[in-house]
Amino acid sequence: MVHMLENRLVPATFTVTTVLDTDDGGTSDVSPGADGVLSIREAFLASNATTATAATPNVVQFNIPGTGVRTIAVGSGVTATALPALTQPVVVDGYTQSGASPNTLANGGDAKILIELNGTAAGATASGIELAEGSGGSTIRGLVVNRFAGNGVLVDSDGNTIAGNYVGLDATGTTAQPNQVDGIVVRGASNNTIGGTTPAARNVSSGNGLDGIHVVGDLTSAASGNLIQGNFVGVNAAGTGSVGVRPGGPLVGTTAGNFLFGIEISGGTGNTVGGTTAGARNVVGFNGAGIEVDNGGQNNVIQGNFSGVGADGTKPVGNVLHGIVLRSNANLAAPLGPGQANEPAVANNLVGGTAAGAGNTVAFNGTGGVAVFGNPIALSNQPNVGNAILGNSIYRNGRSNPTTLLGIDLTNGFAFPTDDGATANDAKGHGTPADPNNFQNAPVLTALTAGGTTLTGTLTQSISPSTAFRVEVFASDADPAGAAAEGQTFLGFATATTDATGAATFTFTLPATAAGRTITATATDPANNTSEFSNALIVPARGTEVLVGSKQFAVGSDSGGSSVSVLNADGSQAFAIAAPFGAGFTGGSRVATADFNGDGVPDVAIGTGPGAATQVIVVDGKTQAQLFSVQPFEAAFTGGVFVAAGDVTGDGKADLVVTPDEGGGPRVDVFTGNGFTRIASFFGIDDTNFRGGARAAVGDVNGDGVGDVVVAAGFGGGPRVAGFDGKSLTGTPTKVFADFFAFEQTLRNGVFIAVGDVNGDGVADIIAGGGPGGGPRVTVFSAAGLTAAVAPTTVLANFFAGDVNNRGGIRVTARNLDNDANADLVVGSGTGAGSHVTVYLGKSVQATGVPAAALDLDAIAGFTGGVFVG
């Protein structure tokens, strides 16, 4: 039937009241036609006949009787005919149907969409909804669009919003019901928004015959300024599962998302896929390839997306080919090509970026993580260059062939989609049209310093003298498939500036979190050409002892005894030494536990108390054999010693630190655990005339992976504490924080000292215990953010430990007794206060109040003289 529709002059609302696709002349909800209902076809025709603007669009809403999903079989009432293309601005809102509701989940899907457009009967070329010229400013939301022979949603006008739809799926968002071409396609149009940054705006476009979302432009019909944000593409509505299997083609039977690409920018310029906020992230998985720019696409931004990783940030949803790929089309047959006439380069696109949140996560994909192909035909004589790949997390790609496929591949050896693997520096050209990203050379990582804290490397590119390159550094976990190292965690960047010959060196300080991981780097030139990943270096695993201590602790008698017990985390005895310095010595034993010989079992260092020439022994924790013995100070000095242990050399073995007790100066001697050679001897308190001795502890205060030495004044001195960088001890020791007083400055009974990462923030905190004559006060100071000019001020804990009436002070150490990331406090009774030992778990320590005791015991039955712990 042919209608003469009046051209209304004001925007109008049209309410669809039937699932039938009829056309009997009804053009409004006021006058619905002979059948008394308004179909979606009639509503579209009526909207087209009603003048509207982007600011005041028409509205098509739904009030179809019945329950559940209302399926409109497009073309069933008007034989094999697509819905009319929309030509006026209009909001088509499926969420107006009673019972429907948009998604509310940030990383999942709970949308209830009740209006389904089924295109099975719509005709051989029909698309579901078409926004034609004149419709700019429209919104399509809250619809299920599936089973059309063409596209699901076709956008040919500017400034539209497509949000909150399921395209290519059933109404549950779990099962593919493919549109045979693309799910959502923007064709030669600009400034459209596909999705959005709120959960309600998310489209799920999966299961389609070609792309999930496709932006198409060329030299004569630009497609620019389009935003593709917050969508799930190829995955189900939950963002972590597939929507079925591929029914045919070369990938038949494999897990199906969209059958070709997830998101494709084909010839478009200046479009954005994703963004720097979590809400802008697209989750792209199970497609042929994840995100692609081709056919001369330039100046597009791809940021913050998950490609191959589910919405939860961990679930593998790998694409069959690349996670992100930039390529030319001209030499390829449909549907991969051919390209537009005089196809420009795919150039000046940004994958990731330097802003917070800009990095994409690209993992678990079948071929390369990110690939840039050369322009093999180069009809325009333009190379595919200037494509910056910055700040991304790229790991565990190349699942189809882990031995040759890469995290980043600059490739021109084969036609798309075949990668050619690693390209050696200078092995190919630097400037022909077929050279992707100008075959920018990768850095060469040359060395890690002791302890794995400083990375050095070189960058050589003879064609770029006197040029500053951005060198990005990454850490990765070991790949279980044994693939070449990629770049899982972006650590930061260094600048490498070449000399007149094109050669440069650079250094980069690695954080403590890099320990035990594989380090790689990329180089990016000022024209934004990024290289493949460099060679890899493995950072030595960082011993946890420098942060949280060993898993056992020792208890030594104070004056009046000398026995030593080494206890397990539950308080049971691992072994005991009744008289480490002979039966006649009763001056007490000062103790520290650590793994000196690298066998994985804590050993115990024992030092003499006062009354004899000083002696320190180290006893093997596994065999109880003596590993080392030394008289650290002059034979005439009989005031006793304190011992501490920890890895200050970065070789993975604990080193020994010895300080004198009363009568000695504040001297600190350091012996290597590997051979017990004295490597340092210095004054730990800036008063060479002080003769109250010193106490020391070892732990990683500055977070560089190497133990530092913290020194406290002994009896007779104020409660002064100093800290020294472990890496500086073999030269002139340098401070890691400004000296400070742990307690009131007027006190003169010194400080017992320990260090350990009580709050689990990656640096060892400073633990002070009251000296003899004072109460059993324990104060824990945060070491976060300290420098040589900054003293600790943040108090993590301040309480009286054990027997609050004790005035013999309190001895302290830090151990890892519950095997978590927090150092636990072990305190022992001071002079004359028994042999009581109390354990407080680090996770229970708080700024106010007394933490609950996890363990409380008398370590040496019947002994009342006090104990040392270590």
Image (cartoon, rainbow, N blue to C red):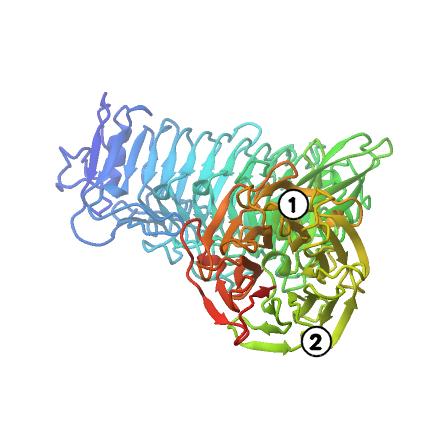
For this rendering, which residue is in front, 336 or 574? 574
Labelled disc at residue 256: none
- Identity, as a three-letter code, of the amino acid under mark 2: Gly
Q: Please tell me in which quadrant of the rendered image residue 504 appears.
A: top right
Q: Looking at the figure, which quarter contains the C terminus?
A: bottom right
Q: Position of residue 398 (x, y in %)?
A: 63, 57
Badge 2 density bin: few <14, some 14–19, many ≥20, Cα 10 Å: few
Picture quadrant of residue 598: bottom right
Q: Amino acid at mark 1?
A: Ala
Q: Position of residue 489 (x, y in %)?
A: 60, 49
Q: Quadrant of the N terminus?
A: top left
Residue 518 position in % (x across, y down): 68, 55
Cα separation, mark 2 vs mark 1, equals 36 Å
Mark 1 closeness class: few <14, some 14–19, many ≥20 residues within 10 Å: many
Q: Position of residue 664 (x, y in %)?
A: 73, 53
Residue 390 shows in this picture: no
Residue for badge 1? 722
* Image side of residue 164 versus residue 598, left or right: left
Q: Residue at x 75, y 74 (%)?
A: 626
* Left or right, 714 with reference to 357: right
Q: Earlier in the sequence, mark 2 or mark 1?
A: 2
Q: Is residue 442 left or right of residue 81?
A: right
Q: Is residue 500 above or below residue 490?
A: above
Residue 434 visible? The answer is yes
Position of residue 725 relative to residue 518, above or below, is above
Q: Quadrant of residue 292?
A: top right
Q: Looking at the image, is mark 2 or mark 1 nearer the viewer?
A: 2
Circle 2 sits on which residue?
A: 584
- At mark 2, the secondary structure is loop
Q: Secondary structure at mark 1?
A: strand
